[in-house]
Amino acid sequence: MSAQRGEFGSRFGFIMAAAGSAVGLGNIWGFPTQAASNGGAAFVVVYLMLAFLLAYPVLMAELTLGRHAHGNMITALAKVSRNGTQRGLGTLVGIVGIFTASLILSFYAIVSGWMIGFGLAYPLNALGATDASTWLSEFSFNRNLLLMLVFMALTMTVVAGGVEKGIERWSKRLMPALIVTLVALALYVLTLDGAAEGLAVYLVPDLSKIWSTDLIFNAMGAAFFSLSLGVGTMLIYGSYISDEEHLPTLGAQVALVDVGIAVLAGFLILPAMYVAADRGVMIFNEAGGLLSEDTLIFVVLPALFDSMNETGTVLALAFFGLMSIAALTSSISMLEVPVSFLVERFQWGRLQAALVATVIISVMSTAIVANFDALFGLVITISTRYSQPLLGLALCLYAGWVWRRDLLLKELAKNEPLIEPTLFMKWWPWYVRFVCPTIVVVILVRTIA
Ligand code: TRP
């Protein structure tokens, strides 16, 4: 079995795939407005610190465990276990991880479907198909269901292609397209009236907000979600990295791309919001904060595009295309979690595994679409606020306490360019053992309390 195990064909391919997983809707619709409402550049600094002080070490735990085992989360946790209890608990953690990844995909696919819908609505409208265009951009059971299924089908097609021919190939195509589109959109929007004001809101630091505990806890949650941590996504991608690669460097590159794109998205979203305000669009909520998340993407920005005629159509197409790409490279990494499990555990072919996982997740997603008000928010809360940090904690405990230190160091030091232990090698094992679990426990206690 291991002879035919998938592997990323190149370092660039891995970085694009892992960064593609990390860069998603979270970066573009969450980060910029959170930054603006929480002290501008001050938030950006806190976020950067947390990304590197908390999320990067946990990312390294996943990548190292994955590459060491060359297998999914259950295999990896069993491999580092020293007794039956640890193995049993590891299996439980792995199963919860697979379930959480599927749950996250079941709501993510609905939102991603909307991105595709809005992306199609603008050109259709320009071509005169106004009914279709309206149908695609208005909330309805049928629309939500159909677009979710389309998005799941796209995700399945990529994953069924395999690690190198599916995931890597598409990430290598889509990620550069995403970056070019994002930069082009930001540059254009920055030339419009009102943009400078948005830039100021984004970049002028308001230091009075930086010590607010809420801000710090929000930034931590955002960093965790943004790097796709906890559910075994990064672990399985780590398992496809060749033994020739130096892991700490690769992990740092992935974290840098993720954070870089979040920061870059701020140069598009905030100026765009103030350009919209300049044209009479309401960009604040009743409490005086900036509108964010779904209202930002599906109300504020469309109002801006609508005010621009043909240019608006082009911008909307580029923007929703960008969001769809960001969503797809993330969703394939979520689907890979159950698929790799089915392939490795039951020796299924990839196509069969991808098909079965897609059907199960689509059924879960349909249940959410059918009971939207009751389930949508609930599933997000359970999977991202509770399950993800708990799983992150378990991974730190396995990497920091269960795994024998000398074996862990050996895995990390593969291809270490220097003979002297690097700063990373000196600090990380200690850090992932004490500091990361402490931080995660503190967040959890605050979330529950
Ligand atoms: N990181 C992605 C985003 O920012 C979402 C994502 C992909 C994810 N894979 C994940 C989140 C696994 C949690 C777990 O949108």
Image: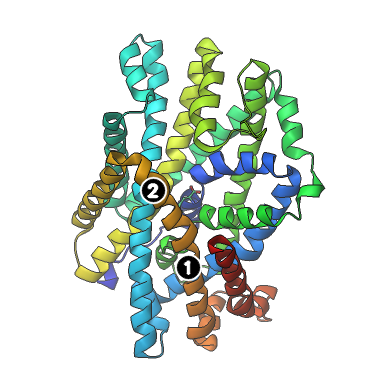
Q: Amino acid at mark 1?
A: Leu
Residue, disc 2 = 331
Of residues 251 and 133, which is closer to you in this image?
133
Residue at x 63% of width, y 43% of height: 34
Residue 25, relative to residue 19: is it above or below? above
- Rendered location of residue 310, percent (x, y): 50, 11
Residue at x 65% of width, y 81% of height: 419
**Mark 2 Cβ and ligand 1 under 8 Å apart:** yes
Residue 39, relative to residue 190: is it above or below? below
- Rendered location of residue 259, percent (x, y): 61, 50
Instruction: Tell me which colouring the rendered structure shows.
Output: rainbow
Of residues 211 and 112, which is closer to you in this image?
211
Does the rendering let one see residue 341? Answer: yes
Q: Is residue 173 left or right of residue 43?
A: left
Q: Which mark is residue 390?
A: 1
Q: Is residue 17 left or right of residue 87?
A: right
